Amino acid sequence: NADMAMHKSKTLGRSTYHFYDSEMGNRLTRNVLIESRLRLAMQSNQLELYFQPKVDLLTLDCIGLEALLRWEDEELGQVSPAEFIPIAENTGLILPLGEWVIEQACIHMVEWREKGELIPPIAINCSAAQLRRDDFLERLTSYIDKYGVDTQSIELEVTESILIEDAERCAELLHEVSKLGMKISLDDFGTGYSSLSYLKDLPFDCLKIDQVFIRDILENEKHAALTLGIIQMSHSFGLKVVAEGITNQAQLDLLRKYGCNFGQGYLFGKAYHSDHVVSNI
Ligand code: C2E
Ligand code: MG
Ligand code: MG
Ligand code: MG
Protein backbone atom coordinates (compact mmCIF):
# COMPACT_ATOMS: atom_id res chain seq x y z
CA ASN A 1 0.00 0.00 0.00
CA ALA A 2 2.90 2.32 0.65
CA ASP A 3 4.07 1.47 -2.87
CA MET A 4 0.72 2.42 -4.21
CA ALA A 5 0.91 5.83 -2.55
CA MET A 6 4.42 6.34 -3.96
CA HIS A 7 3.29 5.36 -7.41
CA LYS A 8 0.46 7.87 -7.25
CA SER A 9 2.83 10.62 -6.19
CA LYS A 10 5.02 9.99 -9.24
CA THR A 11 2.23 9.83 -11.77
CA LEU A 12 0.37 12.81 -10.41
CA GLY A 13 3.34 15.06 -9.75
CA ARG A 14 5.07 15.30 -6.42
CA SER A 15 4.74 18.97 -5.55
CA THR A 16 1.08 19.50 -6.35
CA TYR A 17 -0.21 16.37 -4.70
CA HIS A 18 2.19 15.99 -1.82
CA PHE A 19 -0.33 16.82 0.90
CA TYR A 20 -3.00 14.62 -0.61
CA ASP A 21 -0.46 11.80 -0.92
CA SER A 22 0.52 11.82 2.71
CA GLU A 23 -3.13 11.98 3.78
CA MET A 24 -3.89 9.02 1.58
CA GLY A 25 -0.78 7.22 2.78
CA ASN A 26 -1.79 7.72 6.40
CA ARG A 27 -5.21 6.36 5.74
CA LEU A 28 -3.83 3.32 3.93
CA THR A 29 -1.40 2.66 6.75
CA ARG A 30 -4.17 2.88 9.33
CA ASN A 31 -6.41 0.62 7.27
CA VAL A 32 -3.70 -2.01 7.00
CA LEU A 33 -3.08 -1.75 10.71
CA ILE A 34 -6.78 -2.07 11.49
CA GLU A 35 -7.03 -5.10 9.23
CA SER A 36 -4.21 -6.93 10.97
CA ARG A 37 -5.35 -5.94 14.47
CA LEU A 38 -8.90 -6.98 13.61
CA ARG A 39 -7.70 -10.44 12.53
CA LEU A 40 -5.94 -10.71 15.86
CA ALA A 41 -8.97 -9.45 17.79
CA MET A 42 -11.16 -12.06 16.11
CA GLN A 43 -8.75 -14.86 16.98
CA SER A 44 -8.36 -13.76 20.58
CA ASN A 45 -12.00 -12.94 21.29
CA GLN A 46 -11.53 -9.22 21.84
CA LEU A 47 -14.74 -8.24 20.11
CA GLU A 48 -18.00 -7.77 21.92
CA LEU A 49 -21.59 -7.47 20.95
CA TYR A 50 -23.49 -4.61 22.62
CA PHE A 51 -27.22 -3.98 22.41
CA GLN A 52 -29.05 -0.72 21.79
CA PRO A 53 -32.77 -0.41 22.56
CA LYS A 54 -35.39 0.45 19.95
CA VAL A 55 -38.46 1.98 21.53
CA ASP A 56 -42.10 2.55 20.65
CA LEU A 57 -42.32 6.34 20.32
CA LEU A 58 -45.77 6.54 21.93
CA THR A 59 -45.29 4.27 24.95
CA LEU A 60 -41.45 4.34 25.13
CA ASP A 61 -41.57 0.55 25.62
CA CYS A 62 -38.47 -1.22 24.38
CA ILE A 63 -39.62 -3.21 21.35
CA GLY A 64 -36.28 -4.48 20.12
CA LEU A 65 -32.51 -4.49 20.58
CA GLU A 66 -29.94 -3.85 17.87
CA ALA A 67 -26.72 -5.85 18.17
CA LEU A 68 -23.70 -3.60 17.56
CA LEU A 69 -20.04 -4.62 17.47
CA ARG A 70 -17.63 -3.07 19.93
CA TRP A 71 -13.86 -3.41 19.74
CA GLU A 72 -11.30 -2.04 22.16
CA ASP A 73 -7.79 -2.69 20.83
CA GLU A 74 -4.69 -2.57 23.01
CA GLU A 75 -2.80 -0.45 20.47
CA LEU A 76 -5.54 1.43 18.69
CA GLY A 77 -7.95 1.96 21.56
CA GLN A 78 -11.66 1.95 20.84
CA VAL A 79 -12.23 1.51 17.10
CA SER A 80 -15.68 2.35 15.75
CA PRO A 81 -17.50 -0.20 13.61
CA ALA A 82 -18.13 2.71 11.24
CA GLU A 83 -14.37 2.50 10.60
CA PHE A 84 -13.61 -1.22 10.81
CA ILE A 85 -16.73 -2.69 9.16
CA PRO A 86 -15.92 -1.16 5.73
CA ILE A 87 -12.37 -2.54 6.07
CA ALA A 88 -13.75 -5.94 7.00
CA GLU A 89 -16.02 -5.73 3.95
CA ASN A 90 -13.11 -4.91 1.63
CA THR A 91 -10.90 -7.70 2.92
CA GLY A 92 -13.43 -10.51 3.20
CA LEU A 93 -13.08 -10.52 7.01
CA ILE A 94 -16.76 -9.59 7.16
CA LEU A 95 -17.70 -13.21 6.40
CA PRO A 96 -16.24 -14.80 9.54
CA LEU A 97 -16.98 -11.63 11.53
CA GLY A 98 -20.63 -11.53 10.44
CA GLU A 99 -21.00 -15.17 11.31
CA TRP A 100 -19.50 -14.56 14.74
CA VAL A 101 -22.08 -11.80 15.29
CA ILE A 102 -24.93 -14.14 14.37
CA GLU A 103 -23.67 -16.85 16.73
CA GLN A 104 -23.05 -14.40 19.58
CA ALA A 105 -26.52 -12.92 19.20
CA CYS A 106 -27.96 -16.45 19.51
CA ILE A 107 -25.79 -17.22 22.54
CA HIS A 108 -26.93 -14.05 24.31
CA MET A 109 -30.56 -14.83 23.56
CA VAL A 110 -30.16 -18.29 25.10
CA GLU A 111 -28.43 -16.82 28.17
CA TRP A 112 -31.23 -14.33 28.74
CA ARG A 113 -33.84 -17.02 28.21
CA GLU A 114 -32.15 -19.31 30.73
CA LYS A 115 -32.14 -16.50 33.29
CA GLY A 116 -35.84 -16.01 32.66
CA GLU A 117 -35.34 -12.50 31.26
CA LEU A 118 -37.91 -11.27 28.79
CA ILE A 119 -35.92 -9.80 25.95
CA PRO A 120 -37.43 -8.26 22.82
CA PRO A 121 -36.32 -9.38 19.32
CA ILE A 122 -32.66 -8.86 18.42
CA ALA A 123 -31.73 -7.05 15.20
CA ILE A 124 -28.53 -8.20 13.50
CA ASN A 125 -26.76 -6.00 10.93
CA CYS A 126 -25.82 -7.96 7.81
CA SER A 127 -23.47 -6.72 5.10
CA ALA A 128 -24.16 -7.24 1.43
CA ALA A 129 -21.20 -9.63 1.12
CA GLN A 130 -22.75 -11.91 3.73
CA LEU A 131 -26.09 -12.01 1.98
CA ARG A 132 -24.42 -12.74 -1.34
CA ARG A 133 -23.01 -16.01 -0.05
CA ASP A 134 -24.81 -19.00 -1.50
CA ASP A 135 -24.97 -20.63 1.89
CA PHE A 136 -26.05 -17.56 3.92
CA LEU A 137 -29.48 -18.91 4.81
CA GLU A 138 -28.13 -22.38 5.54
CA ARG A 139 -25.55 -20.95 7.93
CA LEU A 140 -28.03 -18.61 9.60
CA THR A 141 -30.56 -21.37 10.19
CA SER A 142 -27.85 -23.72 11.44
CA TYR A 143 -27.17 -21.31 14.35
CA ILE A 144 -30.89 -20.82 14.94
CA ASP A 145 -31.29 -24.59 15.20
CA LYS A 146 -28.13 -25.13 17.23
CA TYR A 147 -29.24 -22.67 19.92
CA GLY A 148 -32.97 -23.30 19.62
CA VAL A 149 -33.69 -19.64 18.97
CA ASP A 150 -37.16 -18.58 17.85
CA THR A 151 -37.01 -17.05 14.33
CA GLN A 152 -39.58 -14.47 15.44
CA SER A 153 -36.98 -13.07 17.84
CA ILE A 154 -34.55 -12.34 15.04
CA GLU A 155 -34.53 -9.39 12.76
CA LEU A 156 -32.02 -8.68 10.00
CA GLU A 157 -30.94 -5.13 9.19
CA VAL A 158 -29.73 -4.70 5.63
CA THR A 159 -28.85 -1.62 3.58
CA GLU A 160 -29.78 -0.71 0.04
CA SER A 161 -26.33 -1.73 -1.14
CA ILE A 162 -27.57 -5.33 -1.24
CA LEU A 163 -29.73 -4.39 -4.20
CA ILE A 164 -26.97 -3.06 -6.39
CA GLU A 165 -25.55 -6.43 -7.35
CA ASP A 166 -27.79 -9.33 -8.10
CA ALA A 167 -30.99 -7.73 -6.86
CA GLU A 168 -33.04 -10.70 -8.01
CA ARG A 169 -31.17 -13.28 -5.94
CA CYS A 170 -31.25 -10.95 -2.95
CA ALA A 171 -34.99 -10.50 -3.27
CA GLU A 172 -35.37 -14.27 -3.32
CA LEU A 173 -33.21 -14.63 -0.21
CA LEU A 174 -35.12 -11.94 1.69
CA HIS A 175 -38.42 -13.62 0.83
CA GLU A 176 -37.10 -16.89 2.25
CA VAL A 177 -35.84 -15.17 5.40
CA SER A 178 -39.25 -13.56 5.81
CA LYS A 179 -41.07 -16.87 5.27
CA LEU A 180 -39.06 -18.36 8.12
CA GLY A 181 -40.56 -15.76 10.43
CA MET A 182 -37.67 -13.33 10.73
CA LYS A 183 -38.29 -9.62 10.32
CA ILE A 184 -36.23 -7.52 7.91
CA SER A 185 -35.39 -3.83 8.26
CA LEU A 186 -33.96 -1.53 5.64
CA ASP A 187 -31.18 0.35 7.46
CA ASP A 188 -29.76 3.85 6.86
CA PHE A 189 -32.58 4.82 4.52
CA GLY A 190 -32.02 8.10 2.70
CA THR A 191 -28.25 7.87 2.40
CA GLY A 192 -27.96 5.50 -0.55
CA TYR A 193 -29.87 5.20 -3.76
CA SER A 194 -33.19 5.35 -1.95
CA SER A 195 -35.03 4.12 -4.97
CA LEU A 196 -38.56 3.75 -3.75
CA SER A 197 -39.82 1.25 -6.28
CA TYR A 198 -38.25 -1.80 -4.64
CA LEU A 199 -39.93 -1.08 -1.33
CA LYS A 200 -43.22 -2.42 -2.59
CA ASP A 201 -41.72 -5.67 -3.92
CA LEU A 202 -39.35 -6.66 -1.13
CA PRO A 203 -40.47 -8.13 2.18
CA PHE A 204 -39.28 -5.32 4.45
CA ASP A 205 -41.15 -4.93 7.72
CA CYS A 206 -39.48 -1.76 8.80
CA LEU A 207 -37.56 1.13 7.36
CA LYS A 208 -34.94 2.97 9.40
CA ILE A 209 -34.45 6.63 8.58
CA ASP A 210 -30.78 7.47 8.84
CA GLN A 211 -29.63 9.66 11.69
CA VAL A 212 -28.28 12.36 9.36
CA PHE A 213 -31.88 13.44 8.75
CA ILE A 214 -32.92 13.23 12.40
CA ARG A 215 -29.88 15.07 13.76
CA ASP A 216 -30.95 18.46 12.37
CA ILE A 217 -34.63 17.77 11.81
CA LEU A 218 -35.63 20.78 13.95
CA GLU A 219 -33.53 23.27 11.96
CA ASN A 220 -33.43 21.74 8.50
CA GLU A 221 -36.80 22.06 6.77
CA LYS A 222 -35.74 19.81 3.93
CA HIS A 223 -34.76 17.01 6.25
CA ALA A 224 -38.02 17.44 8.14
CA ALA A 225 -40.03 17.28 4.91
CA LEU A 226 -38.05 14.26 3.72
CA THR A 227 -38.61 12.48 7.01
CA LEU A 228 -42.35 13.13 6.93
CA GLY A 229 -42.51 11.99 3.31
CA ILE A 230 -40.62 8.78 4.03
CA ILE A 231 -42.91 8.02 6.99
CA GLN A 232 -46.08 8.58 4.97
CA MET A 233 -44.84 6.59 1.99
CA SER A 234 -43.68 3.73 4.22
CA HIS A 235 -47.03 3.57 5.96
CA SER A 236 -48.84 3.46 2.65
CA PHE A 237 -46.70 0.42 1.79
CA GLY A 238 -47.48 -1.19 5.14
CA LEU A 239 -44.01 -0.63 6.57
CA LYS A 240 -43.23 0.58 10.07
CA VAL A 241 -40.65 3.32 10.52
CA VAL A 242 -37.73 3.67 12.94
CA ALA A 243 -36.02 7.05 13.34
CA GLU A 244 -32.30 6.63 14.15
CA GLY A 245 -30.28 8.95 16.34
CA ILE A 246 -32.94 10.69 18.44
CA THR A 247 -31.13 12.71 21.09
CA ASN A 248 -33.67 15.18 22.48
CA GLN A 249 -37.30 15.61 23.47
CA ALA A 250 -38.11 18.14 20.73
CA GLN A 251 -37.03 15.66 18.04
CA LEU A 252 -39.16 13.01 19.72
CA ASP A 253 -42.19 15.32 19.82
CA LEU A 254 -41.88 16.16 16.13
CA LEU A 255 -41.42 12.52 15.12
CA ARG A 256 -44.48 11.56 17.15
CA LYS A 257 -46.43 14.29 15.36
CA TYR A 258 -45.24 12.83 12.06
CA GLY A 259 -46.56 9.41 13.08
CA CYS A 260 -43.16 7.72 13.24
CA ASN A 261 -43.58 4.34 14.95
CA PHE A 262 -40.26 3.62 16.62
CA GLY A 263 -37.01 5.29 17.54
CA GLN A 264 -33.44 4.72 18.59
CA GLY A 265 -30.96 7.14 20.01
CA TYR A 266 -29.11 8.41 23.04
CA LEU A 267 -32.36 9.94 24.38
CA PHE A 268 -33.53 6.36 25.05
CA GLY A 269 -30.23 4.61 25.52
CA LYS A 270 -26.88 3.78 24.00
CA ALA A 271 -25.66 0.30 23.12
CA TYR A 272 -25.19 -1.62 26.39
CA HIS A 273 -23.02 -4.55 27.37
CA SER A 274 -25.15 -7.70 27.60
CA ASP A 275 -24.86 -7.65 31.41
CA HIS A 276 -26.48 -4.21 31.54
CA VAL A 277 -29.22 -4.56 28.97
CA VAL A 278 -31.94 -5.86 31.28
CA SER A 279 -31.52 -3.09 33.86
CA ASN A 280 -31.61 -0.45 31.13
CA ILE A 281 -34.68 -1.43 29.13
P1 C2E B 1 -26.18 1.32 12.09
O1 C2E B 1 -26.57 -0.10 11.87
O2 C2E B 1 -26.95 2.36 11.39
O3 C2E B 1 -26.22 1.53 13.68
C1 C2E B 1 -26.56 2.75 14.28
C2 C2E B 1 -25.35 3.50 14.75
O4 C2E B 1 -25.75 4.74 15.32
C3 C2E B 1 -24.56 2.80 15.86
O5 C2E B 1 -23.21 3.17 15.69
C4 C2E B 1 -25.12 3.45 17.12
O6 C2E B 1 -24.25 3.36 18.24
C5 C2E B 1 -25.25 4.87 16.63
N1 C2E B 1 -26.22 5.66 17.41
C6 C2E B 1 -27.34 5.24 18.01
N2 C2E B 1 -28.00 6.25 18.59
C7 C2E B 1 -27.27 7.37 18.36
C8 C2E B 1 -27.42 8.76 18.71
O7 C2E B 1 -28.38 9.18 19.36
N3 C2E B 1 -26.46 9.63 18.26
C9 C2E B 1 -25.38 9.20 17.54
N4 C2E B 1 -24.49 10.10 17.14
N5 C2E B 1 -25.21 7.89 17.19
C10 C2E B 1 -26.15 6.99 17.59
P2 C2E B 1 -22.04 2.13 15.76
O8 C2E B 1 -22.33 1.10 16.82
O9 C2E B 1 -20.78 2.91 15.83
O10 C2E B 1 -22.13 1.37 14.37
C11 C2E B 1 -21.89 2.04 13.17
C12 C2E B 1 -22.28 1.18 12.00
O11 C2E B 1 -21.40 0.04 11.93
C13 C2E B 1 -23.67 0.59 12.10
O12 C2E B 1 -24.63 1.54 11.70
C14 C2E B 1 -23.56 -0.58 11.13
O13 C2E B 1 -23.68 -0.13 9.82
C15 C2E B 1 -22.14 -1.03 11.37
N6 C2E B 1 -22.15 -2.18 12.29
C16 C2E B 1 -22.10 -2.22 13.65
N7 C2E B 1 -22.15 -3.49 14.10
C17 C2E B 1 -22.23 -4.28 12.99
C18 C2E B 1 -22.31 -5.70 12.76
O14 C2E B 1 -22.37 -6.52 13.69
N8 C2E B 1 -22.35 -6.13 11.46
C19 C2E B 1 -22.33 -5.26 10.40
N9 C2E B 1 -22.39 -5.77 9.16
N10 C2E B 1 -22.29 -3.94 10.58
C20 C2E B 1 -22.23 -3.44 11.84
MG1 MG C 1 -28.34 -1.08 11.92
MG1 MG D 1 -28.66 2.64 10.63
MG1 MG E 1 -25.66 3.96 10.04
Image (spheres, rainbow, N blue to C red):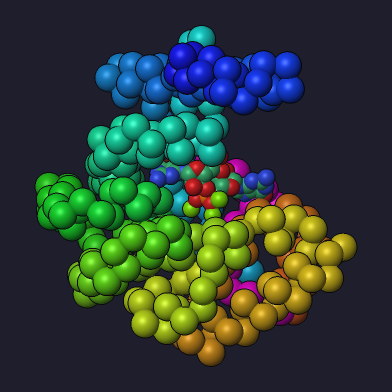
Instruction: Say which of 69 and 58 sits in front.
Output: 69
Residue 128 is situated, as x and y percent measured from the top left of the image, at 35, 53
Report the residue that reaches farthest toward the top.
Answer: 75
Residue 255 is situated, as x and y percent measured from the top left of the image, at 71, 71
Seen at 39% across and 27% down, the residue is: 47
Instruction: Say which of 38 and 29 sits in front.
Output: 29
Q: How many marks?
A: 0
Please provide the residue range marked out in magenta.
258-272
Report the residue that reaches farthest toward the bottom.
Answer: 236
Report the residue that reaches farthest toward the right.
Answer: 219
> Is residue 60 in view?
no
Describe residue 40's horizontal placement relative to residue 142 as left or right. right
Q: Is residue 192 above or below residue 11?
A: below
Instruction: Say which of 103 and 1 sits in front.
Output: 1
Seen at 21% across and 51% down, the residue is: 133
Magenta stretch mostly in which secondary structure?
loop
Q: Is residue 169 magenta?
A: no
Location of residue 201 (image quadrant)? bottom left
Seen at 65% across and 21% down, the residue is: 13
Q: Is residue 85 above or below residue 37?
A: below
Q: Is residue 174 above or below residue 191?
A: below
Q: Is residue 138 above or below residue 175?
A: above
Residue 254 is situated, as x and y percent measured from the top left of the image, at 77, 72
Residue 185 is situated, as x and y percent measured from the top left of the image, at 43, 65
Location of residue 108 (image quadrant)? top left
> Is residue 165 in view?
yes
On-image quarter of the N terminus: top left
Describe residue 223's horizontal placement relative to residue 192 as left or right. right
Q: Is residue 264 magenta?
A: yes
Seen at 40% across and 22% down, the residue is: 35
Describe residue 208's horizontal placement relative to residue 177 as left or right. right
